[in-house]
Each structure stands twice: as structure tokens, then as C-alpha cells.
Image (cartoon, rainbow, N blue to C red):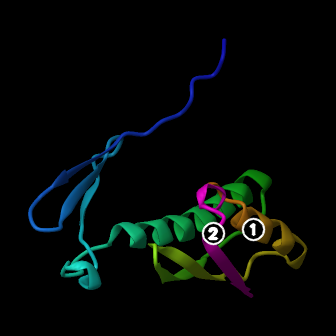
Amino acid sequence: MAEQPHFVEITAESVGGLHVRVAHGPSGASFVSDAPKDNGGDASGFSPTDLVATGLLDCMMTTMAIVAKREGIPWGRTRGRVEKHMHPSPRRVGTLVVDLWMPTELPADRRELMERIANTCPVQRTLHPDVKVETRFHY
């Protein structure tokens, strides 16, 4: 029997102005997004393109933690930061600059593996090739 594709339902509903309430089907967790100020929003929440940047950072960190757990690689506290740079015309995400502060527990001989895992996470593979991603690892 063929394996069924995995899917997650995410729903959205406009809630006034440029605000959208987004809900995660499996958990019921929700948040309200907003347009950025330069597009008429009040920037009271993540914008859709902020969520693209956030998704990349989160995916890199989560995927590395999954592999570390599966492979028995010592793993500890990891921090990350992403800068989103917009391209003006057509308006889109142009560059994402990611900084990852790696756990001190990570053995030196596993650094290359974890860097490769981060740079090939599912969100990274989903991004259009015109989106430039710069990743800096800090040890």
C-alpha cells in the first residue's frame, strides 16, 4: 500500500483592517498577522513575508535538532536570528540573512553535517531560487 502524503490544514480569516487570524489545525494554536507599515498596516504582528523568514529560521533549527536526536549527537541551546531584505520590484523577499549560534556541546567533527542539514531543510528547499539565503554559523 502506498504511503499517504502528510498534510496539515492551516486556516485563515480576515478579522478587520489588514489583520488575518491564522490557525493551526492539529493544535488549534493561532495568531493574528498584519501588513507591514510600508503597505498600510500597523505592524502589530508578523507580516506574511516575516513568516517566510521565520519559517526558514525555525526549520533550520528544528531540522538540526531532529537529526542530532536521531543520531545521538550532543545538542544543547541554539539561538538564531534572521534578517529579511525585501526586493522592491516586483515586491518579494530578496535576501534572508540567517545567523545561527550553535550549541557548545556540538562536537567539532559534526559541525559540517549540521551546517549541511540546516542549509537543506525543507523550507530552504521550498524557497524560489531567486531568494538569496546567506547563513552564518557561530561557534
Quadrant in the rendering for residue 77 = bottom right
User: Residue, x 11% and y 68% (percent of image)?
Assistant: 17
Describe residue 12's horizontal placement relative to residue 2 as left or right. left
The magenta segment: 123-139
Does any portion of residue 76 appear in the rendered image?
Answer: yes
Q: Viewer-proximal residue, 117 or 74?
A: 117
| Residue occupying the far bottom of the picture | 138
Judged from the image, the secondary structure of the residue bearing numbered disc 1 is loop
Mark before the other along the chain sequence, 2 or 1: 1
Does any portion of residue 102 appear in the rendered image?
Answer: no
Residue 98: which numbered mark, if any?
none
Q: x and y percent of residue 58 in the render?
A: 53, 66
* Disc 2 target residue: 130
User: Pointer 2 and pointer 1: residues touching (CB < 8 Å)?
Assistant: no
Q: Amino acid at mark 2?
A: Asp
* Disc 1 target residue: 74
Q: Viewer-proximal residue, 22 or 69?
A: 22
Q: Amino acid at mark 1?
A: Pro
Q: How many marks?
A: 2
How many neighbours does mark 2 have within 10 angstroms: few (below 14), some (14-19), or many (20 or more)? few
Quarter of the figure with the C terminus: bottom right
